[in-house]
Image (cartoon, coloured by chain):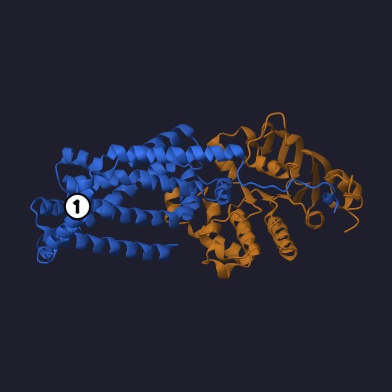
Chain colours: A blue, B orange
Amino acid sequence: MSAAAEPVAREWQRYSCGERIARFVVYLTLVAAVVLSVRSVEVIPEFILDAPEQVADLLKRMWPPDAASYPQEIHQALLDSMHIATVGTVLGVLMALPFGFLAARNVTPWPWLNWMARLVLIATRSVNTLVFALFFVAVFGPGALAGTLAIAFHSIGFIGRLFSEALENTSPGPIEALRAAGAPGVSVISFGYWPQVVPAFWSLVLFRWDINVRESIVLGLVGAGGVGMVLDNAMNLFLWGRVAMVLIAILAVVVLAEVAVTYIRKKIL
Amino acid sequence: MAAVSIRGLAKAYVPGKPVLSGITLDIAADGITAIIGPSGTGKSTLIRCINRLVEPSAGEIIFEGQNLVTLNRAALRSARRQIGMVFQEYNLVERLTVMENVLSGRLGYVPPWKAWLRRFPPEDVREAFALLDTVGLAAHAHARADALSGGQRQRVGIARALMQRPRLLLADEPTSSLDPKTSVEIMTLLRDLTAARGIPAIVNIHNVELAKRFAARIVGMSGGAVVFDGAPASLTDAHLKQIYGGHGEKGWLDGE
């Protein structure tokens, strides 16, 4: 080989000198950020040392869970929460679909419309469900309606965004073929785009429903109906056995929802 | 009487870099016109300018007495219903059935809500079954398109295009994704079905042998312009060298 005539320097380093300095600066910044954050949190050492004792005490008071309270109060509230999650998801889907189509650049070839739809999706997603719930409780009073609307509005951004991404990932070939056959826009959507996004659509609806089941439980804390209200009441009245029962019921429902969604998604995809 | 008259057709995707420069062609009212030429020479662009999947930069395309280039959206849509198209990658909707794909050739005529409910006119359904018989896929009518082989998919593509009852058929590299035997079958189908219906066809193809065997006329393109136009028998090796650029690779044509 001719390379032997001119030996190349065989020193090797993973990072150049500049890169090493840059990495050092990044690490230093991270450490400084952590130190600053910890200081602003104002940790009180006594409370931390005390924590295991407090937790043990709480658990002791929670035991045994108040099973009798389940049929009396918790069951109905839990069903309410599920209804809030389900109806909220359906409403959210109905409101999200138009924005999803408008936000997809290949379906809607007008950038200003894409931009407006995206703005709506970002806005609804960035406002937390609890904030929506506070707002709707103020408008409609406490109860399931406020919770349902809060779930629906917050879901728009999530569903719409993922749906528009699924639309943008569709294969353009079949669309072109339908356009070439003189199909009107609505038929291009129903025959060309829709069949391609159906699996993604159901998958993300189920996924969102799963999230909404968990969110609907918390909503009761701000008076928006469901099992969260029972939990809030029980804690205010120091009924720790009932609190434990609510927590167990919630855990069971969340696990069941997760299992159901995983099973159905596997069947669809 | 020409089925399509192309006059001074030009297309530049990037200003100043024309892909097509001043194409003028008359397509006869029947038979297959094969367009041959090296990759990137504008064959596909030419065929897509005809039904305006690609917008031409200049020139006119006269079809059925109107200039396709200047049509507005609604008029273009009704003109497109008269022009069937077959694609290299078949472009079927994979998750729909074979029958739905064939019937989608009627979408230009069926109101969207009826199409959504799959309520196509009975005579369309009858014709779709007849076409599936002709292309030998009647047994697969209810299968999903993604369950078919490449050759079968292209047969569905042809059935879909003919379902439009078109006055012109465009085929953009219809055999390029297929093996040699299937390619011959597909070209035979295209020739026989268009001949039986008296539909002229414009077929982009880079296989010169297939072009010679199936076309009534061959148009050779090079660098965005027509450099040969005539009967398959009059296409000589000298012409092929002119089309494909014979310099530098001596004997690539005769060496095979």
> B233 or B22: nearer the eye?
B22
Instruction: Give coordinates of residue B146: x percent, y percent.
Output: 56, 62
**Position of residue B188 in the picture relative to residue A180 (left or right):** right
> A66 or A92: nearer the eye?
A66
Residue ID at (29%, 52%): A212
Q: Chain of mark 1?
A: A
For the C terminus of chain A, which image quadrant?
A: bottom left
> B224 or B230: nearer the eye?
B224
Report the number of discs. Answer: 1
Instruction: Give coordinates of residue A164: x percent, y percent.
Output: 44, 45
Residue ID at (37%, 63%): A262
Instruction: Give coordinates of residue B11: x percent, y percent.
Output: 69, 34
**Position of residue B88 in the picture relative to residue A223 (left or right):** right
Q: Note whether A165 is above or below B65 in the view shown.
A: below
**Position of residue B76 in the picture relative to residue A74 (left or right):** right
At mark 1, the secondary structure is helix
Seen as rendered, the residue at the extreme bottom is B139
> B29 or B96: nearer the eye?
B96
**Position of residue A169 in the picture relative to residue B44 (left or right):** left
Quickly name the residue at label 1.
A50
Q: Note whether B121 is above or below A41 in the view shown.
A: below
- The amino acid beneath tag 1 is Asp
Residue ID at (30%, 51%): A89
Q: Residues within 10 Å of mark 1 (few under 14, many from 20)?
A: few
Can residue A43 be seen here? The reply is yes
For the N terminus of chain A, which image quadrant?
A: bottom right
Can residue A87 be seen here? The reply is no
Instruction: Give coordinates of residue B27: x percent, y percent.
Output: 74, 44
Seen as rendered, the residue at the extreme top is B16
